[in-house]
Image (cartoon, helix red, strand yellow):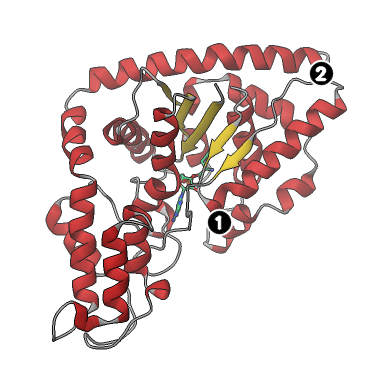
Amino acid sequence: MPRVLSGIQPSGQLHLGNYAGAIRQFLDLQAAQHEMFVFVASYHALTTQRDPAALRAATRQIVVDYLAFGLDPAKTAIYVQHDVPEVTELAWLLSCVCPTSFMDKAVSYKDKLAKGFSANVGLYTYPILQAADILAPQADIVPVGKDQVQHIEITRDLALRFNHEFQTAVFTIPGHRLAPDAEVLPGIDGEKMSKSYGNTIDPFQEEKPLRKRLMSIKTDSKGVSDAKDPETCSIFRIFRGIAGKDDPRTRDLAAKYADPSRHSPEGFGYGHAKQALFELILDHFGPARSRRAALMADQGYIDQVLKAGAGKARAVAQITVQKARAAAGL
Ligand code: TYM
């Protein structure tokens, strides 16, 4: 069975973009009986996070959310990055074959600087640590959103380089996997939905603030009776990202954008579309929302899950690191 690895940074609360780009794929691949490794990228978050309590809480919360969405610890090793120290050792081995030009071309670093984050070395070499995450368990498939594809390409380049420079076949060469119809989900301001940009939608938010949040999605100023372009509308794109392109509700929404009188003689405005998105979120995430409440109350179970997950991840990572050290003459 192919091995799958992916992770999410605990730089804030999980959002609809993470779900549409990544988590939904984790669930599909788990259902397809792949050998799964899914983790929380705590060391990656440390490149920008300076509030220890917030980092601790977000790390824990993402684990709870993984479980609430339906990741099953019997099928998927769920762990926290800093519980698998072999990964940081591997990151060093990889950094020694990594030309600085690989990091210079990484767009995520430039994006972070443009957003005002400080230029620390951890942020600069971030893709090397990500490569180590992926190569440690010898993953074949890395399910991610589009914004992460360059990091997986860097991972492939580093694996090939290490294998070549040390005349070895230590590393499996991984490939990325995008969700079917993958697109980068916009946030409430129309920019990429991102934990660090303050524009996210949280599928677990209480109903009242969730509705308020959705009502604040930025739109153009077209009125209820005007035809609207779904492709340039964040509400529609988020809706499609959750329901799916071929879902009848998505088709119905697109039809109402094109011809608002299909909804009622008065028309169909952005307020109606936001209400439809609200209902979709409550429906789609209903089971996960109730599971989450129960999981939050059982922290002992979360500890058990993480211990078992880290055990599985370390067992495979230790083999890889041993091979890589030996290949390099250590
Ligand atoms: P992160 O935490 O930014 O995002 C987690 C996953 O969610 C996807 N994603 C999106 N997809 C669609 N629309 C959006 N608006 C959106 N925002 C985020 C991301 O593509 C990602 O798949 N560097 C990674 C974490 C990481 C990792 C890894 C991932 C560390 N090591 C190893 C895979 C393999 C990151 O910051 O993701």
Secondary structure under badge 2? helix
* Amino acid marked by disc 1: Lys
Task: Tell me, for residue 328, which label it has, or none.
Answer: 2
Q: Earlier in the sequence, mark 2 or mark 1?
A: 1
Q: Position of residue 118 (x, y in %)?
A: 56, 53
* Amino acid marked by disc 2: Ala
Q: Is residue 315 visible?
A: yes
Residue at image point 17% right, 77% down: 263
Task: Tell me, for residue 112, which label it has, or none.
Answer: 1
Q: Is residue 125 visible?
A: no
Residue at image point 46% right, 34% down: 42
Q: Position of residue 181 (x, y in %)?
A: 47, 55
Secondary structure under badge 1? helix
Give the CA separation, mark 2 to mark 1: 33 Å
Q: Residues within 10 Å of mark 1 (few under 14, many from 20)?
A: some
- Quarter of the rendering containing residue 2: top right
Question: In the displayed structure, does residue 146 sit left or right of residue 320?
Answer: left
Which of pointers 2 and 1 indicates the residue nearer the eye? 2
Seen from the viewer's position, the closer of residues 273 and 15 is 273
Question: In the displayed structure, does residue 240 sit left or right of residue 42?
Answer: left
Quadrant where the C terminus sits is top right
Quadrant where the N terminus sits is top right
Question: In the displayed structure, does residue 325 sit left or right of residue 8?
Answer: right
Q: Residues within 10 Å of mark 2 (few under 14, many from 20)?
A: some
